[in-house]
Amino acid sequence: MRARHLTSLILRAATGSALLATLVVAAPAAEAAAILPPRPMSTASGIATGAATSTTAAAASPALAVGQALARKVFGSSSPEAAYAALGAAEKQALMAFETPVSQVVTLRPLVVSGTTALTSSPVVGIAGTTVRCWYAELHVENNAVAGNTIYTYWQRLRWCSTNGLTISSWTVLDRGGETSTPGWSYEGHGISGGVLVGPQVRSYTQEKFRFNVLWTNFVNSPCAQIRGGARGAASSLTTCSVA
């Protein structure tokens, strides 16, 4: 059964601040969850920069340096299969520690729009005194190896609006995608996507595809990013496509 990883935040429109959470969790061995390095984002007030801490730690890891050297040796060879076969048992183990996703960093944060922290738009008064307010958020998921390097990352950016803080009036996926950061892995594009209304909440999910296709194996991981946005700005996230 696929594990669910939950992160939550409350978008506080009145104060322009947000509760941000970054969660590091173990990923199931059979599910190499995906992630991609964050696209450049402003560090305006209330915005987290993502995986700077884990990247710094990885840079100092001897296992990372060994894994990088072995990956260059094997994948840069004219015959990767022969290069891998020539490795000793310890070297093969070190290479797989560099290539196998074992943990996730899940970050849900307010989205920067036009250089500002767009926790919410200004309320718009409509027909019969109704008020429409909108929120923006980004879910960023990073999958890391034992060696400390990032294997791949994926994200979703969502805008949702509500009427009078009671019902969701609209939602839009502003961006979605994935990237790889380790040799041997490639980003294969979008998978399924969708969104449903469950009470005063929209549940928007997007799926990305990542392929490991070298040496002795060829398989595709298809992880999901899901943002759940409430009619009053509350938001939470899951790394599953299930909207139950």
Image: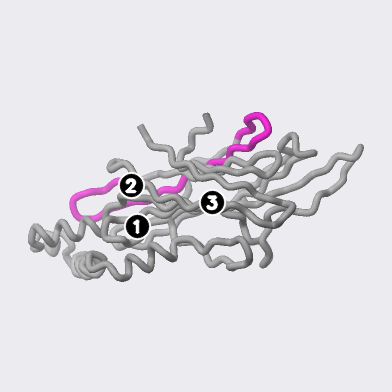
* Residues packed near mark 2 inside 10 Å, few (<14), some (14 to 19) or many (20 plus): many
Quarter holding residue 81? bottom left
The dominant secondary structure in magenta is strand
Q: Is residue 40 left or right of residue 202?
A: left
Q: What amino acid type should be assigned to the residue bearing mark 1? A: Ile
Q: Secondary structure at mark 3?
A: strand
Is residue 218 magenta-colored? yes
Q: What amino acid type should be assigned to the residue bearing mark 3? A: Leu
Which numbered tag is attached to residue 151?
1
Q: Which colour style is shown?
A: one colour
| 135 versus 147 height, above or below | above
Q: Quadrant of the N terminus?
A: top left
Front-most of residues 87 and 56:
56
Q: Secondary structure at mark 2?
A: loop
Q: Which residues are magenta?
A: 196-220
Q: What amino acid type should be assigned to the residue bearing mark 2? A: Ala
Q: Are marks 2 and 1 in contact (CB under 8 Å)?
A: yes
Quarter holding residue 90? bottom left
* Residues packed near mark 1 inside 10 Å, few (<14), some (14 to 19) or many (20 plus): many
Q: Position of residue 59 (x, y in %)?
A: 32, 70
